[in-house]
Structure formats: C-alpha cells, structure tokens
Amino acid sequence: MAIQKEFVLRYRSEGHVRFQIPRRATQAQVAKLITDNILAIEGVYAVSLFRRSKKLVIRYHENVLSFIDMARQLHVALAALEQQGWFDPQAIVELSKKPRLGLKHKFKAGKIKRWFGEKVTAAKETAQAAKLLGKLSSKGPTALIKDPEKAIIGFLNDILVLYLIKVHWTRITQQWLVKPFVHRYEWLATFYLFFLLVRSRRPK
C-alpha cells in the first residue's frame, strides 16, 4: 500500500488539519524528514508530529495555500520519501540498530535546549524593543507627574504594540514582506495601528 493512503484525515478546519499516520512514519529520523518536507511548503507555518499517538498536525495560511494544494504537495513529499526507501521495514530496522547518541548530544539536540534558546532570544528581542519604545514613547517621570492618565494610556499602548509586533514578527519577515500584495490587508491594519499610535503622541 502506498504510504499516502495510510495518512488518514481525522480533522479539518480553516488552516488546520490532523492526520492519523502509520507506525512506520513515526521513527525519529523519518518523522524529522516528514516534518522538514512539510515545513518547506510555502504557506505552512507549523507542523507537529506526535510519534506515540501517531498523529500529524499541520497549520497553514489558507489565504496563501489552499487545502487541495497542501494535500497535493504533501502527497508528492511522501511519495518522494517512499521512493528513497525511508518507509521500508528494513530501513526502519537498520535505523533502530544505530548506536544511540550520548546524553550530552541528546541535551543539545533536545527540546529543552530549543525551548531555552527560544526563550533567551525572545527575552533579548523584548528587552531591545522595550528600550526603543522607552526612548520614543515618554519623556521620563515628568510626563507621569504632569498627566498621569495620558502617561499610563501611552505606556499601555506601547505594550500592546510591542506584543503585536512580537507575535507577528515571523509572519512579517517571512510572509508579509515577501508577498506584500497578498497580505495587503495586514499591512493596512499595521499602518493604521501606527497612525493611531503617532496620533496619540501629538500634543492637543
């Protein structure tokens, strides 16, 4: 049986699908190849393959990639891996016989390090952005004394803008800038947000 027929669609909503996958697709190295190939599809922004429960979850932008196109490209990627022999029982046995890596290497390649690295990077970006906003947004404690309400509202607006930029940063750099016309409504919303921010800074 072709490997594609063993990927059973269990759930579908806008930009979100979940498949039940066969056991031979859950071996660690094979699972990574599947995940990398799916992430290479333009419009896909998140892929999770759960080896124990044999589930594959894909999240994508439907305004960039339709479900039919996503399924077609997934079919092609799985067929290519199958032709390379990754789903053969013998290949799985050989992979399982390979010597296990040491604890130090596992830690470096494991989820803990990736999670810690992401948090450190996010903290650095947040600190830099907060520093920049601090320079642009207020005039120091004097503004809080003169007009506490305006200073507090301005501070909260800065936090909101910082949060929105942080949440959408990956999409801005990898999708919105690459295809500005496709994401024109997102850009319009961004420009309007900055217009409101600048307008709130103008003296009455």
Image: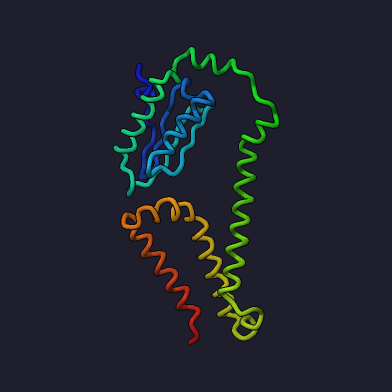
What's the residue at 60%, 73% (across, down)? 135
In the image, residue 69 sits, relative to residue 161, either above or below, namely above
Position of 154 with respect to 87 (left or right) is: right
What's the residue at 38%, 44% (across, down)? 43
What's the residue at 56%, 74% (across, down)? 137
In the image, residue 193 sits, relative to residue 179, either above or below, namely below
Q: Quadrant of the N terminus?
A: top left
In the image, residue 167 sits, relative to residue 11, either above or below, namely below
What's the residue at 32%, 54% (across, down)? 182
Colouring of the image = rainbow
* Farthest top residue in view: 90
Residue 190 pos. (x, y %):
41, 64
Residue 87 pos. (x, y %):
44, 19
Residue 39 pos. (x, y %):
44, 38
Position of 109 with respect to 81 (left or right) is: right
* Tally of numbered tags: 0
In the image, residue 173 sits, relative to residue 52, either above or below, namely below
